[in-house]
Image (cartoon, grey):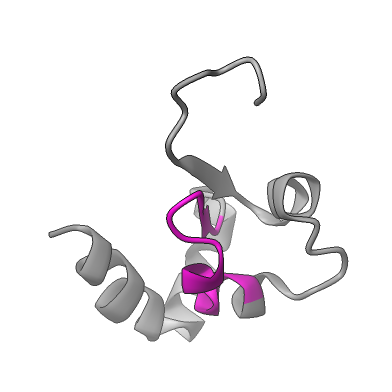
Amino acid sequence: MQRFERLSLVIVLGSYAMDYHLGTGKTPLTRVVEAWREHWPQAFPLPHPSPRNNRWLVRNPWFQQGVVSENGK
């Protein structure tokens, strides 16, 4: 990431990327995504956009209603 001189935002997708880029360790993905403001505006942690995560999206409606709608303006 240091090679990109004008990088202003890193979209971090999934728990492995969150651990690598944000150093979240074993912090649950839900907790990291809920606390996205702690990383803003340098990084934006999101669940991986895999169909396997549909269950996570159903169990966490706050994500679509709050995080996605707030940042999709």
Residue 49's spot in the image, x, y percent? 49, 49
Is 39 rendered above or below residue 16?
below
Residue 12's spot in the image, x, y percent? 57, 47
What residue sits 80% from the left and 56% below the top? 23
Is 51 rendered above or below residue 3?
below
State the residue lying farthest toward the right.
26
Q: What quarter of the picture does the C terminus occupy?
A: bottom left
Is 65 rendered above or below residue 73?
below
Horizontally, is 1 left or right of 48 in the view? right
What residue sits 26% from the left and 79% below the top? 65
State the residue lying farthest toward the left.
73
* Residue 58 sits in quarter: bottom left
Whether residue 53 appears in magenta in the rendering, the answer is no
User: Of residues 32 and 47, which is closer to you in this image?
Assistant: 32
Q: What quarter of the picture does the N terminus occupy?
A: top right
- For the record, the magenta segment spans 32-47
The count of marks equals 0
Residue 18's spot in the image, x, y percent? 70, 53
* Residue 56 sits in quarter: bottom right
Whether residue 39 appears in magenta in the rendering, the answer is yes
Horizontally, is 1 left or right of 25 in the view? left
What residue sits 46% from the left and 60% below the top? 40
Residue 39's spot in the image, x, y percent? 55, 62
